[in-house]
Image (cartoon, rainbow, N blue to C red):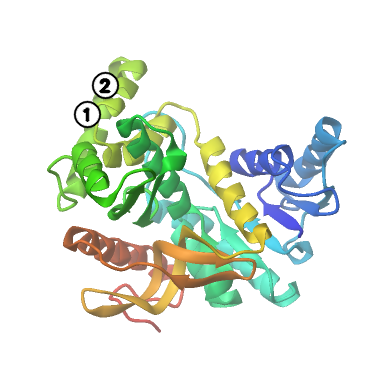
Amino acid sequence: MDVAVIGATGAVGRAVCLQLIERHVLPASSRLQLVGRDGGRSGPAVHGLCADLLDAYDEVAPLIDVATRPQDVVADVIIVAAGATAPDRPGASSDRDALARENARLLHVYADALARNGSGHEVVIMVTNPVELGVAVFAETLGRHRVVGMGAWLDTLRMRREIAQSLGVRRHRISGFAGGQHGNGVVPLWSTVRVSGLDPAERASAVARVRGPRTLDGFAAEIAEAQARLTQAAGRDMGAAFDLVESLPPDLRMVVGPWMTHQSGARTAAGTANATVELVSTLMDGRDIVVAGQVALDGEIALGGAPVRGVLGVPVVLGPEGWSGVLLKGLAPDEEALLLAAQRRIRSVCAPYTGEVSDGGSR
């Protein structure tokens, strides 16, 4: 199976390439295509990255080649990690609408080129933010089951880690999913959380202990309040700000912790690449596996008594040919309400650039 990384020389794209090779996800017989933009800084840089990767990993590297035009992208799995990102500096805005304006044209260019020149069987993993817009654009062009956004899987891994930390166990013992909109619109699906080694009564007690008496009804306000407190703390002492993150409940930590990392001047490239490479491994495994991802729904689930049509982060069954089903039932009322709010926000972001409209319909 061959993999192409659009935006290979960016912080996340480079980390994805490194992890694909270092973790031996791609065998020597596979091909890794590094995609840059002809006429931009990444055009020359992909040639240098190719040489650097071969210098470092010649004994284990797959075949590596370079593409600098959208029409030359060819692979079984296409990772889209190009485009503008939120600034990594204190006080910088992470406005999803602004990112949509910056990245919409690039997303359409690559989606249209892949539709014209591709095999018709590629699976696309969307990393570029807003990830929901990327999924909507590529799903309209390629077919919705061949496109999955990695944001909900990254949020899921973060949620599992924070719950595990609160329980004093390792992340692999925690299952459960996050959905909704990547970023501040994420929805921690507490009803899906399971702890390996605990029976239902023990699990319920453990989850209640780490979650506390809170519900998700005020989750958005809690995020905004925590970010305001962290901004003030970071202005005095960045280390103190990160200590404050650790004092928050796990579902808040999963949101404001990565946000604080960006505010510190660092990036979340390693974690983002890890989640992306895990999805690539799933596609290469040959089996259907349940993950979380942003996908374009067409009535697979209902929220508020109405079928959902449009992009939303949900648990899905992912296999070599893309996603094939949604596994989401028995939601708590606060989870359903927050997913509905996320769906409305996603439609608002996507509507100016796709065939969706923000009032819940389609055109």
Quadrant of res 113: bottom right
> Tag on residue 269?
none
Q: Nearer the viewer, residue 17 or 169?
A: 169
| Drawn side of residue 233 relative to residue 56, left or right | left
Three-letter amino acid code of the residue under disc 2 = Ala
Q: Nearer the viewer, residue 263 or 179?
A: 179
Three-letter amino acid code of the residue under disc 1 = Arg
Judge whether 327 appears above or below 335 on screen. Answer: below
> Tag on residue 233?
2
Query: Who's the residue at 66% across and 63% down the image?
Result: 286
Q: Are marks 1 and 2 in contact (CB under 8 Å)?
A: yes
Q: Position of residue 341 (x, y in %)?
A: 25, 62
Q: Position of residue 37 (x, y in %)?
A: 71, 52
Judge the density around disc 1: few (<14), some (14-19), many (≥20) Cα neighbours within 10 Å: some
Note whether residue 104 is visible.
Answer: no
**What's the CA distance linking mark 1 and mark 2?**
6 Å
Identify the secondary structure beneath mark 1: helix
| Drawn side of residue 337 relative to residue 298, left or right | left
Q: Circle 1 sits on which residue? A: 229
Q: Nearer the viewer, residue 35 or 273?
A: 273
